[in-house]
Image: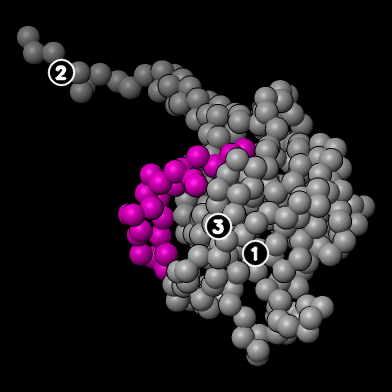
Amino acid sequence: MENNDSNKPINIKKFFRYLFITFFIVFIIRAFIIDSNYISSGSMIPSLMSGDRIISSRFTYGLSIPFTNIKIFDFNQPKRGDIIIFEPPTREFSKKMGFESPINTTENFIKRVVAIGGDKIKMIDSTIYINDKEIKRIRQKSIFSFKSLKAPYWINYSSYLHLETIGKHVIYSLDMIPYPQMSRNFGVNKFNKITYNKHSLINSYTIPKNMVFVIGDNRGDSEDSRFFGPIPLKNVKGEPLFIWYSSIDGESRFDRVFKKIP
């Protein structure tokens, strides 16, 4: 006699048990192990592009209780040059640290650590000084050009490309090439010449203990610690690992797929 399994009734309890187990495993993975993040701005160009979707590690810098900043375990602390994912500080916290923050969101940010607790930082015309030592920037012969995009946060001007070493990381950073009519956006430095970024730190700022100072690689188009101040380590959510997909204006960029974060 033929055995027809298709006629067997569905075991509802077993189905929901497997469904619960599946959702529980996914929750554990997303809460403690890995996460997916979308890059929505150009502040980390050329390392990361708007439209990149990245896989990040949640446990590189410790484990937190899901949906909170309460750390259960601390494994490592961010080092100079690391790219981190973090929750920006509140306006009240920034004000207490001496910064008037325009940021009012709990959405995760992604930036590069340039200074850690105890460091003194100063920044003039996009050049960073850590503990009174200048981080040398070597301007490259090639000019970086932005792709023409519809997104309002893109400023479609060419940029100077610089090579610099922060911590153990050799990175590229950008300075948009300013034009005289752009001085309103960029500001004027002490020599009455157009500066790349009017948000300079002319006076040294000492990073408090258990905090880090972050700046975007796209120095002239990044809302970072120059605006909202240092980041408490408890706000650090993880470390980006690689790009799993990327698109710009709806066009897939397969050359960036599975690209390791530089």
Q: Which residue corresponds to mark 1?
A: 219
Q: CA distance from mark 1 to mark 3?
A: 13 Å
Crowding around mark 1 (Cα neighbors within 10 Å: few <14, some 14 to 19, many 20+) is: many
Q: Which residues are magenta?
A: 238-262
Q: Tell whether label 2 touches label 1 (CB within 8 Å).
A: no
Q: Which residue corresponds to mark 3?
A: 163
Q: CA distance from mark 3 to mark 2?
A: 68 Å
Question: Residue type at mark 3?
Answer: Leu
Secondary structure under the numbered disc 2 in the rendered image: loop
13 to the left or right of 112? left
Secondary structure under the numbered disc 3 in the rendered image: strand
- The mark total stands at 3
Q: Which residue corresponds to mark 2?
A: 4
* In the image, residue 155 above or below residue 210: below
Labelled disc at residue 128: none
Question: Residue type at mark 1?
Answer: Arg
8 to the left or right of 155? left
